[in-house]
Amino acid sequence: MPKITTIEPHRRRPDEWHISLDGDYAFTLDGATLVAESLAVGMELSEDDITRLRAAAEERRIYDSALSFLTARPRSRAEVRRRLLRPRPNRQTPAPEVVDRVLARLERMGLLDDREFSEFWVEQRERFSPRSASAVRFELRQRGVAREITEETVDSDQDEERALTAGRQRLRSLGGLDYETFRDRLGPFLLRRGFSYTIARQVTKTLWEETHGDTPEEDAEDGTGDTLDDD
């Protein structure tokens, strides 16, 4: 049977160890696995042992990749799964069942939770780039979040307030304009954020009144007050 000839620490990752069998590199294990398996130089390993330890090493590699991906911001389960299964040059794509075991482990540890991810996404959108409830739900569904979770975490009743926040963030680029130009720029912007025509029209009027102190004329006779072109 193959024999362990060296156990050497990884140069950059202190909790990982390179294992050589009969003088050739075989796999890398984390310290916990090394201790749990009581591996030592001179120990002989069966083919079943080698297969099992290589599988453990691969699962650890996938786990570390998932943690790295989660470092920047919370992610949905589907986002992480797609990332881990993404084909990469010179590296074999992991088996889906191994990836699913890693995802289940992350969920048990509280590091992967679609409800918490949805709440994070909604909070970030409302703070930095407000959009309608329907637009945010669509974004979440694109990221693999179940419909029932998006329905619970995104409140449609707050759309007018979100539109006001979005419009106020846009005001600095709308100074010095007459009402018609102001309307024709702000209205389509709100529509592109997913807000309804009714909300976009009302918020445009409200923000004009806030910034100019008067009520805009709607040009009701020729109907120009009832259009919001999205050019």
Image: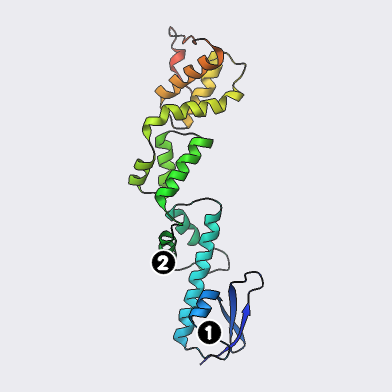
Closest to the observer: 35 or 26?
A: 35
Residue ID at (43%, 45%): 118
Closest to the observer: 203 or 115?
A: 115
Furthest toward the top, the residue is 221
Which residue type does callout 1 highlight?
Answer: Leu
Please report whichever mark, 1 or 2, sits nearer to the chain's N-terminal start.
1
Estimate how packed mark 2 is, as few (under 14), some (14 to 19) or many (20 or more) residues with alpha carbons within 10 Å. some
Residue 10 in the figure: left or right of residue 112: right
> Which labelled disc corresponds to residue 176?
none
Callout 1: SS: loop
Q: Position of residue 197 (x, y in %)?
A: 41, 24
Residue ID at (58%, 68%): 90
Of tags 1 and 2, the one toward the viewer is: 1
Callout 2: SS: helix
Q: Which residue is mark 1?
A: 39
The answer, for residue 189, to whether it is visible in the render is no
Estimate how packed mark 1 is, as few (under 14), some (14 to 19) or many (20 or more) residues with alpha carbons within 10 Å. some
Residue 144 in the figure: left or right of residue 188: left
Q: Is residue 229 above or below residue 146?
A: above
Residue ID at (59%, 77%): 17
Protein image colouring: rainbow
> Which labelled disc corresponds to residue 101?
2
Is the Cβ of the residue at disc 1 closer than 8 Å to that at disc 2?
no
Q: Position of residue 87 (x, y in %)?
A: 52, 62
Q: In the figure, residue 181 lies in which quadrant? A: top right
Q: Is residue 53 above or below residue 188?
A: below
Closest to the observer: 32 or 219?
A: 32
Q: Position of residue 58 (x, y in %)?
A: 50, 72
